[in-house]
Image: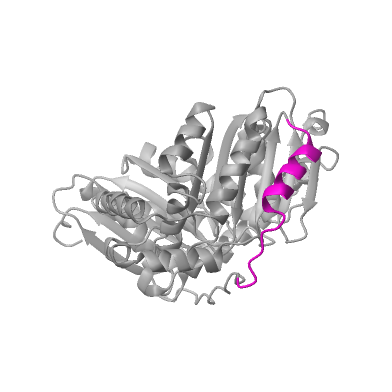
Amino acid sequence: MDKHTPSFPGPNTISHYELANGIVVLVHENPHVHSVVMTGSIDAGSLFDPAEAVGLASFVASSVMRGTRRHDFSAIHEMLEGSGASLAVSGGLHTVGFGGKSLAEDLSLLLDLLAEALRYPTLPANQVERLRGEIITGLKIREQDTRFMAGKTFRELAYAPDHPYSRQTRGSVETIGQISLEQLRNYHQQHFGPKGMLLVVVGAVQAQHVLRLVEDRFGDWENPNQPAPPELPALAPFEEARRQTVVMPGKSQSDIVLGFAGPSRFADDWQAANLANSILGMFGMYGRIGAEVREKHGLAYYSYSRVDGGLGPGPWRVIAGVNPANVDQAIEAIRAELRRITTELVSQDELADNKANFVGRLPLQLETNEGIAGILLLMERYQLGLDYLHRYAELVEAVSAEEILSAAQCYLDPDCYALAVAGPEPSPGE
């Protein structure tokens, strides 16, 4: 690993700037390819959604490229298609994200259109209504999906109703149907601004040239009314298991989501929790859970675990798709693996194999401009330092089996959990 480390992006190859209005720009020059990738975010996610208008932030984010002061919907997409470029804006829980790709000589076009979309969208009524119909149709389709409904119900169980993590970023059929054009425009006016904006550019560009382009398009952007992200409500620990079943007639499969509120990416034990999750339900064919629940006992079509580790205490959960007749058996097998990882040290072989996987896959993630840009964005968002990639192997190798056990015990409990099951009518006695 050490021999590869100097080629990783680091303090000597990542240019880091902060504009006077607070926008942070990172540039990594990669002259070996002719393309350029741009990615970033602004602090305007669904954390700000009022309870009666859940999905508002996501709706706005999806609307901003439907027309701007200079170009209508057709013109925007004709310009992108004419140069073989792509650009998209989407809403998330904490942020509104954006990303695009083009030939290096078309970076100015990408930045022009991004600036128009973020700063000067017109949110034309006809396009907004068309988009509303598309969103509602998508939501209705998702409501017929057992995996989606299990995940939605899990969040409602795992987080209090006043916690933003309990809600769906895209909203519901009811809330999207009631959001007015005035609400969309007011949300944009209030929440879109430069404070907290991150912009990463990677490709066949020169850093100083990129900075001039960004400064020209965003340097005068101000929004004195832009609010700071709200504080997340405190989490109450689970005192017992919480279970809910969503009956979906006509389905042939049941989906299970069993989990907890997990660590944020800022938590001191994040890396230990991430390795614990890999051992539990990710490594190889989905770790211990895949080996026991799916392979050994044949109780699931798929089974794995996931720890989100975002800006707040996102979920740490086990997800499985099972034959409805196997729901209770699968749940007990999952709980057995949770009990094992919270009571026993992982073996040195397991630990070594998972560390090797973490370290070995990093160079593969950095083979493309997209991969580099995504990692640089995470490095800045979570304040990991420009030398993070150079330190990564050392950080992973430093995690001990005792720290993995401690992290698992901190967040996982085989007896107190949130459990959602979505599928056909339960069999008698379930």
Quadrant of res 15: top right
Q: Nearer the viewer, residue 144 or 213?
A: 213
Can you say which quadrant of the picture contains the N terminus? Answer: top right
Residue at x 59%, y 39% (from the top left corner) = 110
Residue 407 appears left or right of 131: right
Q: Position of residue 87 (x, y in %)?
A: 52, 39
Q: Residue furthest right?
A: 12
Whether residue 418 can be seen here: no
Residue 414 percent across, percent down from the top left: 44, 62
- Estimate the x, y position of residue 24 in percent, counting from the top left: 72, 53
Residue 262 x, y percent position in the rendering: 54, 62
Left/right placement of residue 153 relative to residue 23 reads left
- Residue 216 magenta-highlighted: yes
* Quadrant hosting residue 428: bottom left
- Residue drawn where x is 53% and y is 66% of the image: 189
The magenta region covers 205-225
The residue sitting at 48% across, 44% down in the picture is 71
Relative placement, left or right, of 349 versus 126 is right
Q: Can see residue 342?
A: yes
Q: Nearer the viewer, residue 264 or 419?
A: 264
Position of the C terminus, as image quadrant, is: bottom left
User: Is 263 rendered above or below residue 324?
Assistant: below
